[in-house]
């Protein structure tokens, strides 16, 4: 039997979301700071939750491991919360996949719906753990204090969203959606009634078909001994019953002696 479609859908989205969340966690690009005061014009500061990098767009030179130079940024509450929740999301997703995989029935006739639903619930919760810190960080994007920002009174700060925020949103949504679809298998309306899982019910009705009666072919040729047997019919009666499509031959050898009429009247 084939694997149900909702389990395939969940097992495809969950690992993809986990990879995106892993990239969002370790990459130092949650926000970028451009056009710093008293700094080269091609300098871009990339800040993540674990590290800070200084990138020069003209020469493509990147200097990372700048965490010690900006401890004010890493002491912010959102950074501490994001570090814990992103790591917890990765761990919960891995546990959910480990629980759901044996229930998908890759080697069984029927899936273990309770086990697969529990794994889907864990995966969906891991997606929520990812979306919460990313949404919070996006909300306070421009208000996070940092010594890397050289403020210019003549113009506003040029702070932009990094690609880690985008990857985190996509990965979290994929995990929530995939885990929720797998969790639907716990419902009676979905369990066992997916593609290739519809049970066959016996209504108790039995259809009887009449057995055709074989046709018996009676031989046409008889010997003299068969006419002298005890069967209450003769060869002439069999020919009359079986050979009805043909015209009955006139019996020229028998004469009705009880008939007293004229010969030509009998011929009529």
Image (cartoon, grey):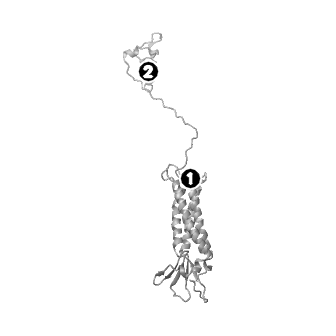
Label 1 Cα crowd, 10 Å radius (few <14 / some 14-19 / many 20+)? many
Of residue 75 and residue 156, the one placed in the foreground of this image is 75
- Disc ID at residue 113: 1
Q: Quadrant of residue 151?
A: bottom right
CA distance separating discs 2 and 1? 73 Å
Of residue 122 and residue 212, the one placed in the foreground of this image is 122
Residue 180 seen in the current view: no
Image location of residue 255, percent across then percent down: 43, 12
- Image position of 127 (left or right of 211): right
Q: Quadrant of residue 133?
A: bottom right
- Disc ID at residue 238: 2
What secondary structure is marked by label 1?
A: helix
Q: How many marks?
A: 2
Above-or-below relation of 21 to 3: below
What secondary structure is marked by label 2?
A: helix
- Image position of 256 (left or right of 161): left
Above-or-below relation of 49 to 248: below
Image location of residue 150, percent across then percent down: 57, 86
Residue mark closest to the camera, 2 vs 1:
1
Label 2 Cα crowd, 10 Å radius (few <14 / some 14-19 / many 20+)? few
Of residue 101 and residue 3, the one placed in the foreground of this image is 101
Above-or-below relation of 35 to 135: below
Image location of residue 119, percent across then percent down: 56, 58
- Disc ID at residue 210: none
Residue 55 seen in the current view: yes
Of residue 150 and residue 193, the one placed in the foreground of this image is 150
Q: Earlier in the sequence, mark 2 or mark 1?
A: 1
Q: Residue at x 58, y 51 (%)?
A: 191
- Image position of 118 (left or right of 55): right
């Amino acid at each position: 039997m084939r694997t149900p479609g909702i389990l395939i859908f969940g097992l495809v989205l969950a690992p993809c979301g986990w990879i995106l969340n892993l990239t969002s966690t370790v990459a130092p690009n949650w926000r970028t700071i451009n056009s710093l005061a008293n700094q080269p014009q091609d300098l871009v500061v990339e800040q993540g939750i674990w590290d800070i990098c200084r990138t020069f767009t003209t020469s493509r030179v990147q200097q990372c491991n700048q965490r010690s130079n900006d401890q004010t940024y890493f002491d912010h509450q959102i950074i501490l919360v994001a570090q814990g929740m992103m790591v917890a999301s990765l761990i919960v997703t891995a546990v959910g996949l480990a629980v759901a995989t044996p229930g998908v029935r890759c080697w069984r006739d029927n899936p273990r719906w309770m086990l697969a639903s529990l794994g889907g619930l864990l995966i969906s919760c891991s997606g929520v753990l990812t979306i919460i810190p990313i949404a919070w960080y996006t909300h306070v994007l421009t208000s996070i204090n940092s010594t890397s920002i050289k403020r210019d009174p003549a113009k506003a700060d040029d702070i932009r969203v990094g690609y880690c925020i985008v990857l985190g949103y996509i990965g979290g949504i994929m995990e929530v959606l995939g885990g929720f679809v797998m969790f639907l298998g716990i419902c009676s309306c979905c369990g066992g009634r997916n593609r290739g899982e519809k049970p066959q019910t016996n209504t108790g009705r039995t259809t009887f078909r009449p057995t055709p009666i074989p046709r018996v072919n009676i031989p046409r040729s008889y010997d003299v001994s068969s006419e002298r047997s005890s069967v209450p019919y003769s060869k002439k009666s069999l020919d009359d019953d079986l050979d009805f499509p043909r015209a009955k031959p006139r019996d020229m050898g028998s004469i009705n002696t009880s008939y007293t009429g004229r010969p030509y009247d009998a011929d009529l």
